[in-house]
Image (cartoon, rainbow, N blue to C red):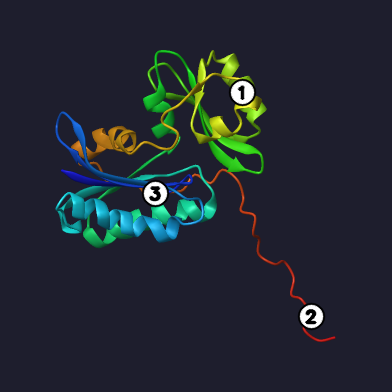
């Protein structure tokens, strides 16, 4: 089965076409561009590019996998709206995966690891994974020092992800180079059991974790002097 994977929860805008068989997951085509200001401009052309490279059409898709975040509002919405729209139009299920899982799961190496992405405001989105790559804390948003303290309590041996690199000094944990951003192969691997079982799709609810910066006005402003 051909599966489209999209993630726009971080500055990395990702699209991939993956073949899911009863025993394997194989990436057929992949695009990833790091640009925090161009999620809307980049994702649709990347989806078209991976389909073209693999010689496939949208009608050939059997499922869609989308990173749910956590992530900033504007960027995260791009991937989820794209996934939800294609799912509805094509009549195929869409499955959501926590984007931090696609960083922490592949980085697991027998000991707990902290996965982090940049949440701006000098904060990170973070979660902690055990040695098998299963999430045991999070996702949460907060100061790097808070995440680091919790990670040490649980015996984390390293930190991974763009947020970990940006706040390496505050975290004080050894860094793992990869994956820096959500890994497309990990996203689909984490959804593979549901895909193979033909499970119903998910509502693709975004993991925002905090309120938006923009708020609705609470009172009307006078227009006359």
Near-viewer residue (10 or 166): 166
Q: Earlier in the sequence, mark 3 or mark 2?
A: 3
Near-viewer residue (196 or 19): 19
Q: Secondary structure at mark 1?
A: helix
Q: Quadrant of the C terminus?
A: bottom right
Query: Residue at 46% across / 48% down in the picture?
Result: 206
Q: Which mark is residue 148?
A: 1
User: Which quadrant holds residue 213?
Assistant: bottom right
The vertical placement of 101 against 38, above or below, is above
Q: Which mark is residue 204?
A: 3
**How far apart are the two marked residues, 3 and 1, measured between alpha carbons?**
29 Å
Q: Earlier in the sequence, mark 2 or mark 1?
A: 1
- Label 2 crowd (10 A; few <14 / some 14-19 / many >=20): few
Regarding residue 6, the answer to whether it shows in the image is no
Residue 9 spot, x, y in % from top left: 46, 46
Mark nearest the camera among 2 and 1 is: 1
Q: Quadrant of the N terminus?
A: top left
Residue 5 spot, x, y in % from top left: 30, 45
Q: Secondary structure at mark 2?
A: loop
- Label 1 crowd (10 A; few <14 / some 14-19 / many >=20): many
**How far apart are the two marked residues, 3 and 2, measured between alpha carbons?**
40 Å
Query: Residue at 44% across / 55% down in the picture?
Result: 39
Q: Which mark is residue 137?
A: none
User: Which quadrant holds residue 173?
Assistant: top right
Q: Which mark is residue 222?
A: 2
Q: Is residue 203 left or right of residue 120?
A: left
How many marks can you see? 3
- Label 3 crowd (10 A; few <14 / some 14-19 / many >=20): some
The vertical placement of 38 against 145, above or below, is below
Residue 14 spot, x, y in % from top left: 37, 46
Q: Is residue 52 left or right of residue 223?
A: left
């Amino acid at each position: 089965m051909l599966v489209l994977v999209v993630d726009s929860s971080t500055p990395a805008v990702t699209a991939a076409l993956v073949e899911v068989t009863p025993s394997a997951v194989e990436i057929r085509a992949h695009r990833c561009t790091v640009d925090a200001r161009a999620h809307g401009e980049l994702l649709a052309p990347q989806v078209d590019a991976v389909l073209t490279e693999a010689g496939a059409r949208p009608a050939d898709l059997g499922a869609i996998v989308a990173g749910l975040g956590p992530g900033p509002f504007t960027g995260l919405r791009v991937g989820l709206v794209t996934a939800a729209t294609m799912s509805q139009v094509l009549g195929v299920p869409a499955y959501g995966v926590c984007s931090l899982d696609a960083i922490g799961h592949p980085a697991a190496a027998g000991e707990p690891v902290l996965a982090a992405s940049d949440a701006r405001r000098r904060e990170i989105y973070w979660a902690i994974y055990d040695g098998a790559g299963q999430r045991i804390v999070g996702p949460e948003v907060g100061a790097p020092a808070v995440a680091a303290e919790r990670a040490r309590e649980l015996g984390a041996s390293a930190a991974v992800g763009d947020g970990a690199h940006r706040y390496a000094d505050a975290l004080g944990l050894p860094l793992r180079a990869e994956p820096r951003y959500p890994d497309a192969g990990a996203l689909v691997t984490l959804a593979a059991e549901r895909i193979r079982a033909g499970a119903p799709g998910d509502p693709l609810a975004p993991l925002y974790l905090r309120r938006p910066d923009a708020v609705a006005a609470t009172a009307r402003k006078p227009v006359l002097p």
